[in-house]
Image: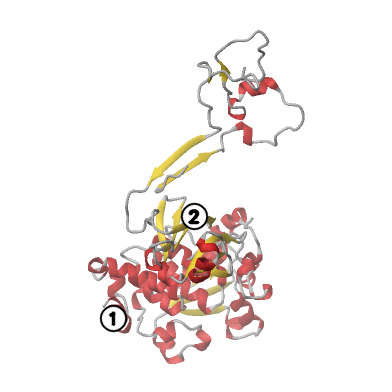
Amino acid sequence: MERTGELWWLDLKSSPAFKGCPETGAADHSSLHQHPIHARPGPVSSVPTQNSSNTGTSTYQANSRSAQTRPLSHGRPLAPGAIGSMRFHSGANVPSFTTGTHFYNYSSGALLDFATPSGPARASDCSLSAFELNTLRWQKLADGHEILDNAYRWRYCTTNEDGTKAWLLGCPIETQELANGGMEEYLSDVMALDLTKYGLVGGNIASETKFSPSQLPASDTCTTSALSGPAVDLANMFDRAPESGSGSDFQITALRDESCNTDDEDVLSLPESQGSATSLSTTPHSAPINVHKLILLARWPHFARAYAAQMVEFHSKKMHIPEPYSAVRAFLYYLYTDSIDVHPEYCPSLFEVAGMLVMANVYDMPRLRLLCVHRLSREMDVESAATIWERAGLAGDDWLRRRAAVFCLMHWGRVVRTQGFKGLSQRSMVELCEVID
């Protein structure tokens, strides 16, 4: 079946046939009548014979030359689950299904569409897109001219088990024309794509990082997260005063949100030990955040190194982070829960996630960085686009920075009226205007 622009799915969760392992051995004819989907009704001879006999649900006689018709008593086979479909008519991010050669793969909860040049379609007409299965929305991850070359034609596409890397197999156009007049497939080149650069977290983040296990938090080295239950209990003890019985034994301060001056970008992007002492001493500190030293030692490699070196934080049991208070609080809450999902108190918007992206880059936390890029790229809106553009530049994420710049260009009239744009530093504002121009 060839239906361009349509998506069909079959829900097997409520089907009893898929809840257990199938039995092997002799077939049970009674079960065939109960589940007609497993045995499609066969044709029946229109001319009855004396030796006719029923086999299963069909009375078809082998080697019979008579006209065959289906019995009227049998309806169409029932599907083992609910069937759904969706048709895409048009949209800014909906790929053109009739242009180029399309390859589809699954990764990170999305259906990936690799549109490659074919025939008259060039790389500028193609793209790498993702269909989010939870929101049923298309997202354009990259334009074709960013990853593809017009001189090649690709025949096959595959991804690794975790969905973080993809490979295209093909050959140059000249080689294809020489191979039996272009009628024979010739595979001579392989192009590798790192999908994590486009915000795809994959299924096993630990195996894709460039750091040794000793440099990562324990949760980053686990293939699956089994901490959902304990994380709820730990979240209940986060930022609770010691008098409440929470057992907190360490305090962290940050910059007040209303007093943050983003012109001091070099200071804001460095840990306290590397920042300017004069700038930090004149900047008002926020209210202290009560945390547990044991959790920070286990989840935050930078804190563990500073504590092992018995720096000033070791003796004072206090630490100052020169980042906005809301971002620092969301970062510490992530250390407790291993989640950056929306929280009405600790992570209410994308501004906190953008701040955590900078902190993930400063403190070498690759999993947090991937989670931030994944969420920012998919939930970007008019209010947060300018802030994401600035923070992506501080974090050194060129792909997310370009994506935010394109978003600002498409909605420029509305972006310049947001608080996120007005809160940019003068230098960042000028740079963003130059990018738009």
x 62%, y 27%: residue:
39
Q: Earlier in the sequence, mark 1 or mark 2?
A: 2
Can you tell which quarter of the image residue 416 is in?
bottom left
Can you tell which quarter of the image residue 261 is in?
bottom left
Along the line of sight, which residue is nearer the eye, 303 or 400? 400
Three-letter code for the amino acid on which mark 2 is drawn: Ala
> In x, y percent, where is residue 288?
48, 73
Q: Which residue is mark 1?
A: 434
Near mark 1 (Cα within 10 A), the count class, few <14, some 14-19 or many ≥20, is: few
> In x, y percent, where is residue 404?
36, 70
**Residue 286 appearing in the image:** no
> In x, y percent, where is residue 381?
34, 62
Q: Which residue is mark 2?
A: 110
Q: Secondary structure at mark 2?
A: strand
Along the line of sight, which residue is nearer the eye, 303 or 137? 137
> In x, y percent, where is residue 306?
61, 82
x 45%, y 82%: residue:
269
x 39%, y 54%: residue:
98
